[in-house]
Amino acid sequence: MNGKEKQGMNGVLTLELLNLDGSLMERRRVPNLITTAGKRLVAELLMGRVNGLPVNWSIVVGTGTAAPSTDDIALKGPAAEAVDPAPKVEVIDQGDNPSLVRALVTATLPALTDATVQPLTEAGIQVTLGENTKILFNRVRFEEVNRGSNMVMKMTWEISF
């Protein structure tokens, strides 16, 4: 080991469409873009420069089709939100390689209550600071997923440092 590491921050969204009985219909893994606001949040938390700590982590989904940009501060077509009541942090042992710390945000959108279909094409992690400051930490655009009344949509976001 040379005492140097190439550290970055990246994220991957895993989308799982589940039948109402819990069986897997489809799984997708999509890498995302960390927004400038997301990177700034991490830096400001490290320096103690935020007015409130994160009180809520949720995954937001939408219908926007524009490519992700570091300047994004919201989804292009917000449609639904699912809260993770207990986000996790874990350290991954990689043997002789530099350590890896991973944050996990997991949320589930229940089946729709009516017989309509909701076409979804984008998602992001939304962090709420204090009472109502919302920050779009990251954003991803993916091929259309049709959420319906016959399925549950489970989303797991891995953010690795």
Image: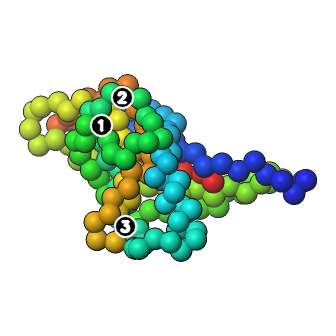
Left or right: residue 90 versus residue 142 is right
Numbered label attached to residue 92? none
Give the residue drawn at x 29%, y 53%: 82
Residue in the foreground of this view, choosing between 126 and 115: 126
Residue 23, given in percent of the width and then of the height, sits at 34, 39
Q: Considering depth in this image, is 44 or 118 the residue closer to the camera?
A: 44
Circles 2 and 1 in contact, beta carbons < 8 Å: yes
Image disc number at residue 76: 1
Closer to the N terminus: mark 2 or mark 3?
A: 2
- The residue most toward the right is 2
Say if residue 13 shows up in the picture.
no
Left or right side of 7 for 38: left
Secondary structure type for disc 2: loop
13 left or right, relative to 98: left
Residue at figure coordinates x 90%, y 53% from the top left: 1
**Residue 129 image label:** 3
From the viewer's perspective, tell me whether residue 4 is left or right of residue 30. right
Q: Which of marks 2 and 1 is nearer the N terminus?
A: 2
User: How many numbered circles does the render carry?
Assistant: 3
Residue 10 placement: quadrant = top right
Is disc 1 placed on a helix, strand or loop? loop
Marks 2 and 3, how far apart in space?
A: 26 Å
Measured from the top left, where is residue 6 in percent x and y? 75, 48
Cα separation between marks 2 and 1: 7 Å
- The residue indicated by pointer 2 is 66
Q: Identity of the amino acid at label 2?
A: Ala
Q: Residue at x 33, y 45 (%)?
A: 74
Location of residue 84 in the rendering, given as x and y in whole percent from the top left corner: 36, 59
Rendered residue at 40%/42% (across/down) = 72
Residue 92 lies, in percent from the top left, at 67, 57
Three-letter amino acid code of the residue under disc 3: Leu
